[in-house]
Image (spheres, rainbow, N blue to C red):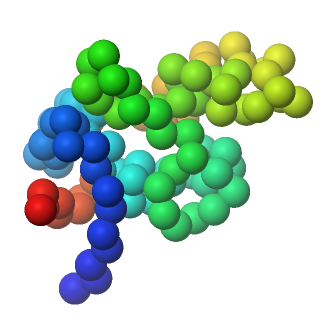
Amino acid sequence: MLHQVIHIHPSAPAQPALGAPCNGCGVCCLAEPCPLGQVISRKRRGACDALRWDEVQAVYRCGAITDAAGVLGPRWRWAGPVLQTLAGRWIAAGVGCDASLTSERG
């Protein structure tokens, strides 16, 4: 069994059951970026660079949706509204948890 240590914000909610609605636990995006996150992060392993912590709601959110211009940076900031519009569909937001990972809090 492969083990990976990810650092989860202590206030993040516990990982939901597979198929349950996303609750912003961040486990999936902290473990590895999704295909969109791979493009944004330019990597296939480790935490997604687009992942954002929402201090007010105490959840993780995809920056491609919540901070598209910030994720893209100054050169591509103009494409932020387009990314924000498409990102929800690309990451399957609202479909349910698809992280077949087992997480433990230490």
Q: Is residue 40 above or below residue 86?
A: below
Q: Nearer the viewer, residue 38 or 53?
A: 53
Residue name at image x 22 percent, y 37 percent: 12
Query: Residue at the location (32% across, 56% down)?
Result: 7
Extreme-right residue of the structure: 75
Residue 17 in percent (x, y) is at 11, 45
Q: Tell which of 62 and 89 is nearer to you.
A: 62
Residue in the foreground of this view, choosing between 34 and 41: 41
Residue in view at x 53 percent, y 30 percent: 63
Relative to 30, 27 lies left or right: left
Quarter assignment of residue 105: bottom left
Residue 29's x, y, as percent? 41, 49
Q: Which residue is the extreme one toward the bottom?
A: 1
Rendering quarter of residue 32: bottom left
Q: Is 48 displayed left or right of 84 in the figure?
A: left
Q: Is residue 22 visible?
A: no
Q: Is residue 23 left or right of residue 45?
A: left
Task: Give the position of the C terminus as an image quadrant.
Answer: bottom left
User: Is residue 11 at least partly visible in the picture?
Assistant: yes
* Residue 104 locus on image (x, y percent): 12, 61
Counting the numbered discs, the total is 0
User: Please, is residue 40 above or below residue 11 in the view?
Assistant: below
In the image shown, does 22 or 61 lie closer to the viewer?
A: 61
Give the residue displayed 22% in from the left and 85% down from the top: 1
Along the horizontal axis of the image, is 100 left or right of 16? right
